[in-house]
Amino acid sequence: MSPIQVRTIPLPKSRRTLTFELERKTVKHINLRVRRDGTVHLSIPKRTTVAEAEAFLCDREDWVLAALSRMEKRAEAHPLAEAVGDSLPYLGGKLEVVWQHGLPARVEADMVNRRLTITLFDPTDPEMRAAAIETFEIAETRKLVTALVDRYYPLFASHGVPYPKAIRVKVMKTRHGSCSAAKGYLNFSSRLCEYPVAFIEYVVVHELCHFLEANHSNRFWREVARVLPDWEERERMGKM
Ligand SMILES: [Zn+2]
């Protein structure tokens, strides 16, 4: 499970619904933040339950709503002249990215028209833009690799490989994926969703093969070829 969950709860006094990010961390106390992009973030110690975290938030309803309304006023006071166009590589093609100003921060994907509409408090802020793209890519890559692990896993189950304990997607600078065979973890780069599906399949199969063989030995490549005979062609699609 991802360490950050997005949850929505009804607030007891105002009866408004509140969407917030819940993150378990090695912290001593619950820590509540309302970011300047209008997202509400709650870090909680590992032992705190979700119910306790939600109760904490409900107790601070007035404070959260006041902070959110301050952010909204600030957003209205600085309207943007125009959104800036852009594009994002996606599954070997491209998605048009439309940036717009507003709150709450969100990403809307229209896959029919291959367009992402990203709403931010300040869509000209490079950090906010990068964070929004990163969040989108992590979610997309997670969906893709999870589906592919499920599709290819049966070929490994018959060799006695247990189902991965965790499939983690994160920013990786130099690699597309890695495997901690002893822990049962698969790790994938958040940017995998930029590549063609044939390549993403290769990365998933490659990492699953490390459950059978830790090194890139001849046996390792025989296992890769057993599942994907055309793996060499696929591998070339991912040159960084
Ligand atoms: Zn490898």
Image (cartoon, rainbow, N blue to C red):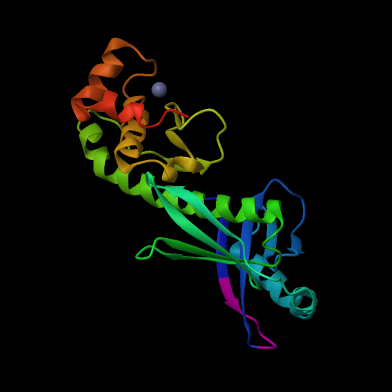
Left or right relative to 230: residue 104: right
Provide residue 57's location: percent of width, then percent of height.
70, 71
| Residue 105, percent from left and from top | 62, 67
Rendered residue at 39%/15% (across/down)? 215
Q: What stretch of residues is rendered in magenta?
A: 8-14
Please check the rendered image and state whether residue 12 is part of the magenta-colored stretch, yes or no: yes
In the foreground, 236 or 190: 236
- Please tell me which residue is depicted at 34% across the width and 41% down the height of the picture: 196
In this picture, is 233 found above or below 63? above
Residue at x 78% of width, y 81% of height: 62
- Can residue 104 be seen in this snapshot? yes
Q: Is residue 236 magenta?
A: no
Does the image show residue 3?
Answer: no
Quarter holding residue 8: bottom right
The image shows residue 106 at horizontal and vertical percentages of 57, 67
- Residue 12: image location, x then y, percent: 66, 85
Is 35 situated above or below 164?
A: below
Of 154 and 37, the residue lying toward us: 37
Q: Number of callouts in the render?
A: 0
Left or right of residue 6, residue 156 in this image: left
Q: Between residues 145 and 89, which one lies in front from this camera angle?
A: 89
Residue 235 quadrant: top left
Ligand 1, what quadrant?
top left
Q: Would residue 76 appear left or right of 99 to someone viewing this image?
A: right
- Report the front residue among 40 and 86: 86
Which residue appears farthest toward the bottom when viewing the image? 14
Name above or below for residue 232 compared with residue 102: above
Side of 62 relative to 134 (left or right): right
